[in-house]
């Protein structure tokens, strides 16, 4: 097909950016009117030419000045939130000039699906625009806020200018950590252990005895009754907690994941892991976390829960390794008094053999099994529950729609053992 000159010209015109056409057309019209006015000497055309020139110049200056002396600020208490809570912020836009900003279009290119701070505003001389934004956090993860761009236009839509007025930052949304009333039928049965007898320099709930004061000992360790009795400063000695460390094994093997969004095995597993970490840390246990995404060393410090939630905000399903490989690769981390809590949606029982091998070294295990068949097309977990009962591993069964507070109160293997 052969195109004529007019068709080719029209095609080139379509390739011109949209914002360029109005001022370009007006500039061409001004040129034509000016030439006709000069050629014919018509005063009316001279007036019209001046009017077009003033319109072009004024519109250009108004649009260009819209981005001058413009200040943007995002005010937040913290760039942290929890699933189900609101992330609150205040968007502040200030005009630091006596020139008005007639048309400002603010665009935030953030990634949070529930958040939208884009708007169109007008600012008078030294004007200020404040907009509170409340974003419901439905998903855990890390979301980019910004960058923010401002576009200024004149009232006639002839010219527009655009520039970035704010950089980007990251919002971390933690999974929700539920308040579990209990974990297991008997308090202390799961994380119980033997006294280790290891003296430590930091404070623990277990006082091992007293000794003479040494330079460098903190004053809050002084035992005043013994000091008064002996007539010299005596300080308390501490030893490690008599309870075993608890390792949460979060299995996020991609092949075991079923469902999407909040009602998926992935999100149920992460919520269960966060809730168990909170419960065990509140009980004074040292808690560690292992998943395909990373490892957090066992600790009982105050910030440990925050570290767990930070890691859980980032975790995603991985192709490798599987749960069995993960247990075998990390088994050297576990002491003979430690306890494993394995959280998985896997339906095969191959990994149960790994728990048998680890238990031979004195490491105890428990499992939180997500019934994949209740989340979507997947085999039932009943065979796995039976295998865990045979291996004497307490297993807690969680189905879609279950309240974790109830599902984690009594092992499914206990009921299975009672029927047998």
Image (cartoon, rainbow, N blue to C red):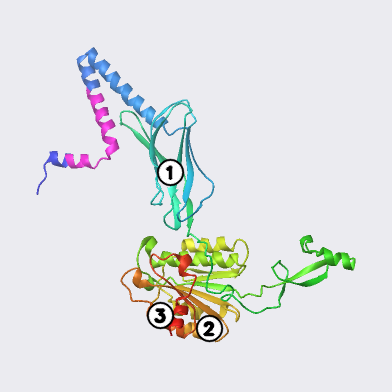
The image quarter containing residue 233 is bottom right
Q: Position of residue 361 (x, y in %)?
A: 57, 85
SS at mark 2 in the image: helix
Q: Which residue is pictured at 39% across the width and 34% down the height?
A: 121
Residue drawn at x 62%, y 78% is 193
Is residue 258 found left or right of 312 in the rendered image? Answer: left
Magenta stretch: includes residue 184: no
Q: Upstream in the sequence, badge 3 or badge 1?
A: 1
In the picture of the structure, the residue carrying the numbered disc 2 is: 358
Q: Position of residue 320 (x, y in %)?
A: 42, 74
Q: Residues within 10 Å of mark 2 (few under 14, many from 20)?
A: many
Name the mark nearer the viewer: 2 or 3. 3
| Residue 400 at x, y percent in the picture | 38, 66
Disc nearer the start of the sequence (1/2): 1
Residue named by callout 1? 148
Q: In front of the other: label 1 or label 2? A: 2
Give the farthest residue toward the left: 1
Q: Is residue 328 in sight in this rendering?
A: yes
Q: How far apart in space, not on screen, are marks 3 and 1 (Cα)?
A: 51 Å
Q: Which residues are magenta?
A: 10-32
The residue beneath circle 3 is 384
| CB under 8 Å between discs 2 and 3 | no
């Amino acid at each position: 097909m052969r195109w004529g000159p007019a068709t080719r010209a029209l095609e080139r015109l379509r390739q011109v950016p949209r914002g360029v056409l109005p001022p370009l057309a007006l500039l061409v019209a001004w040129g034509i009117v000016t030439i006709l006015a000069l050629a014919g000497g018509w005063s009316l055309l001279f007036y019209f030419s001046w009017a077009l020139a003033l319109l072009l110049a004024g519109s250009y200056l108004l649009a260009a000045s819209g981005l001058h002396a413009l200040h943007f600020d995002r005010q937040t208490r913290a760039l942290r939130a929890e699933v189900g809570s609101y992330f609150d912020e205040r968007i502040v836009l200030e005009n630091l000039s006596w020139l008005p900003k007639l048309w400002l279009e603010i665009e935030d290119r953030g990634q949070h699906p529930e958040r939208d701070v884009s708007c169109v505003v007008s600012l008078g001389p030294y004007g200020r625009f404040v907009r509170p934004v409340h974003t419901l956090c439905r998903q855990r993860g890390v979301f980019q806020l910004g960058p923010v761009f401002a576009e200024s236009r004149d009232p006639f839509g002839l010219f527009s200018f655009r520039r970035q007025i704010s950089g980007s930052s990251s919002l971390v949304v933690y999974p929700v950590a539920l308040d579990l009333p209990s974990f297991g039928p008997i308090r202390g049965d799961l994380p119980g252990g033997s006294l280790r007898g290891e003296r430590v320099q930091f404070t623990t709930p277990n006082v091992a005895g007293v000794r003479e004061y040494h330079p460098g000992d903190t004053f809050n360790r002084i035992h005043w009754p013994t000091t008064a009795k002996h007539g010299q400063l005596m300080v308390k000695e501490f030893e490690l907690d008599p309870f075993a460390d608890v390792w949460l094994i979060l299995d996020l093997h991609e092949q075991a994941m079923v469902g999407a969004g909040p009602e998926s095995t992935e999100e149920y597993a992460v919520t269960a892991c966060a809730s168990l970490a909170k419960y065990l840390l509140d009980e004074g246990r040292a808690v560690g976390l292992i998943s395909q995404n990373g490892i957090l060393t066992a600790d009982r410090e105050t910030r440990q829960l925050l570290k767990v939630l930070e890691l859980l905000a980032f975790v995603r399903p991985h192709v490798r390794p599987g749960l069995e490989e993960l247990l075998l690769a990390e088994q050297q981390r576990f002491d003979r008094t430690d306890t494993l809590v394995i959280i998985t949606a896997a339906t095969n029982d191959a990994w149960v053999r790994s728990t048998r091998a680890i238990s031979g070294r004195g490491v105890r295990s428990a499992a939180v099994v997500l019934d994949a068949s209740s989340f979507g097309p997947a085999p039932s977990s009943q065979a796995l529950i039976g295998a865990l009962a045979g291996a004497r591993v307490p297993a807690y069964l969680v189905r879609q729609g279950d309240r974790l507070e109830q599902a984690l109160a009594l092992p499914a293997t206990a009921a299975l053992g009672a029927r047998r």
